Amino acid sequence: MVIESLISPLKAEAKPLKMMLFGFIYTSIAIFLGWWIFKEQSSLVFVFLTTMAAVPLMYNTIKLEEKKDCMNLPEKTLLREHGRALALFMNLFVGVTLACTVWYTFLPNNIISFLFKIQSDTIIQINSTVTGFSIRNFEIFTKILSNNLKVLIFCVLFSFLYGVGAIFILTWNASVIGVAIGNFIRSEFYKISSSLGFTYLTNYFHIVSIGLFRYAIHGIPEILSYFTAGLAGGIISTAVIKHDFGTKAYEKIVMDSSLLLLLSFFLIVTAAFLEVFVTPVLF
């Protein structure tokens, strides 16, 4: 009850950047406990522990957003209010990603081989199915979009069935992205240290910046789309639990959730386009 009670939804929405720090703390504690107690299964256990820490805040935030839907606010105002919740979620996600990146980059090989095993295997599997620079390749675009849409559907489904079920999927994705960035940074560190040694400190900051920016270009709209879809599913789930079904308030909630789903679809298409046609050109 200690970790999840550190911050309330109202405070988190007022200062969403704080959630980046909380995401980092949640994940760091989960990584330590996962490695200490469940070494062999730590790569999945720390994702569950991070999810457990984030669930109360996610649940209370979604309840707060569902209440806003019942206040008869104009649609623009309502979307702006939901934007605060999405900013909260995005900063939490960034914190989780940064924690995974930092620990993957600086921990010894014998530890990360256990701690991030499943994430590393997932990245290898993704790289084996999507090769080349993907420029002007519509087939790869449709494949990436199809995979992302599946995750989007799971976010809506998990949020509807479990209230905040999407947080597990998003935490898992954050861990995979963090490992991918960390792997890129470690590889580039090794190349530079082998040829130049450790004297050129600016090169290392440059590598970190490139590693983060490389995945941020398409990663931000992609993850934002998942959170938007998860928020829509969670709002509907909360409305069903509160027996708002059949009322005017419920109709408004459904309309608002539909707009959020349309927004999430637009974001997921944009993210796939950036991943296939823009990121390979820049990197």
Image: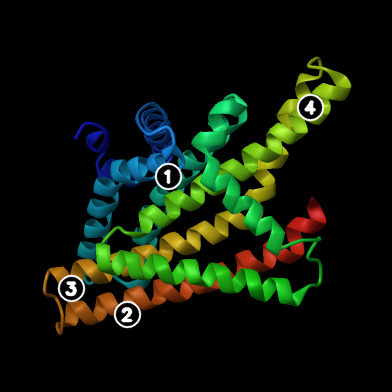
**What whole-number distance in Å separates the C-alpha atoms at marks 4 and 1?**
33 Å
Name the secondary structure under disc 2.
helix
Q: Position of residue 247 (x, y in %)?
A: 14, 82
Query: Is residue 151 found left or right of 70 in the rendered image?
Result: right
**What whole-number distance in Å separates the C-alpha atoms at marks 1 and 2?**
37 Å
Of the numbered discs 4 and 3, the one sitting upstream in the chain is 4
Q: Which amino acid does the dot numbered 4 rest on?
A: Asn
Residue 69 visible in this rendered orientation of the protein: no
Q: Residues within 10 Å of mark 3 (few under 14, many from 20)?
A: some
Q: Residues within 10 Å of mark 4 (few under 14, many from 20)?
A: some
Name the secondary structure under disc 4.
helix
Q: Farthest residue in the right direction?
A: 195
Residue identifier under label 1: 44
Residue at x 80% of width, y 53% of height:
282
Q: Residues within 10 Å of mark 2 (few under 14, many from 20)?
A: some
Q: Position of residue 19 (x, y in %)?
A: 39, 40
Residue identifier under label 4: 203
Residue identifier under label 2: 255
**What whole-number distance in Å separates the C-alpha atoms at marks 4 and 3?**
54 Å
Q: Which amino acid does the dot numbered 2 rest on?
A: Met
Q: Farthest residue in the left direction?
A: 243
Q: Which amino acid does the dot numbered 3 rest on?
A: Val
Of the numbered discs 4 and 1, the one sitting upstream in the chain is 1
Of the numbered discs 1 and 2, the one sitting upstream in the chain is 1
Residue identifier under label 3: 240
**What whole-number distance in Å separates the C-alpha atoms at marks 2 and 4?**
50 Å
**What whole-number distance in Å separates the C-alpha atoms at marks 2 and 3?**
14 Å
Q: Nearer the viewer, mark 4 or mark 1?
A: 1
Q: Position of residue 139 (x, y in %)?
A: 73, 76
